[in-house]
Image (cartoon, helix red, strand yellow):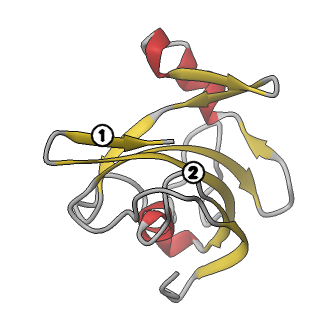
Amino acid sequence: MKRLSGLTLLEEREGAGQVAQKGDHAVYNVRLYLNKGDEVLLNEKQAEYAPKEKIRIQDGVTLIDRTVTLGRREVMAGIEQALIGMTVGGYRKVRISPHLAYRDKGLPELIPPHAVLVAEIWLRAVLEASTVRAQ
């Protein structure tokens, strides 16, 4: 993983599939935690509005299948940078500094301003040229 200032790799498990690169559409799941360990219940909040086919329950935990085009700044910078170079079926746990996350704004009722986040990320699929390679 390319080291970006403010992004620290804490744990990694390689997958066996396609490598995610800029320009690819990546389907992923993420769990967010505040640096002190409290989970940010973003998935649970979003599950109230997400289509059922995008909701995944794994080991009793609600996850949302999210799709992003890498390189287009459609997701927080720390998540995007962690996804680039991952292989389908892979997992990364990263610490994200505020300038690569929600900065001084935070996310009302979920993430305070200037929060350092820890993200657990699973890459589920890479979609490119209308071909899906999933695991």
Is residue 38 left or right of 93 when viewed as pictured?
right
- Mark 1 secondary-structure assignment: strand
Which amino acid type is marked by label 1? Val
Which residue is depicted at the point 16% across and 39% down?
130
Q: Residue furthest right?
A: 37
Which residue is depicted at the point 29% across and 60% down?
70
Q: Earlier in the sequence, mark 2 or mark 1?
A: 2
Q: Is residue 1 above or below residue 122?
A: below
Q: How far is the residue under mark 2 from the one under mark 1?
A: 13 Å
Residue 9 x/y as whole percent: 67, 77
Q: Which residue is mark 1?
A: 132
Taking depth in this image into account, of 100 and 15 the one nearest to the observer is 15
Is residue 119 left or right of 22 when viewed as pictured?
right
Q: Are marks 2 and 1 in contact (CB under 8 Å)?
A: no
Is residue 81 left or right of 13 when viewed as pictured?
left
Q: Is residue 48 above or below residue 13?
A: above
Which residue is depicted at the point 59% across and 46% down?
30
Is residue 19 left or right of 112 when viewed as pictured?
left
For residue 110, the mark is none
For residue 89, the mark is 2
Residue 74 x/y as whole percent: 30, 52
Residue 71 x/y as whole percent: 25, 66
Which amino acid type is marked by label 2? Gly
- Mark 2 secondary-structure assignment: loop
Which residue is depicted at the point 60% across and 74% down?
97
Taking depth in this image into account, of 24 and 43 the one nearest to the observer is 24
Indicate the quadrant where residue 56 lies. top right
- Check disc 2: other Cα within 10 Å, few if <14, some if 14-19, many if 20+: some
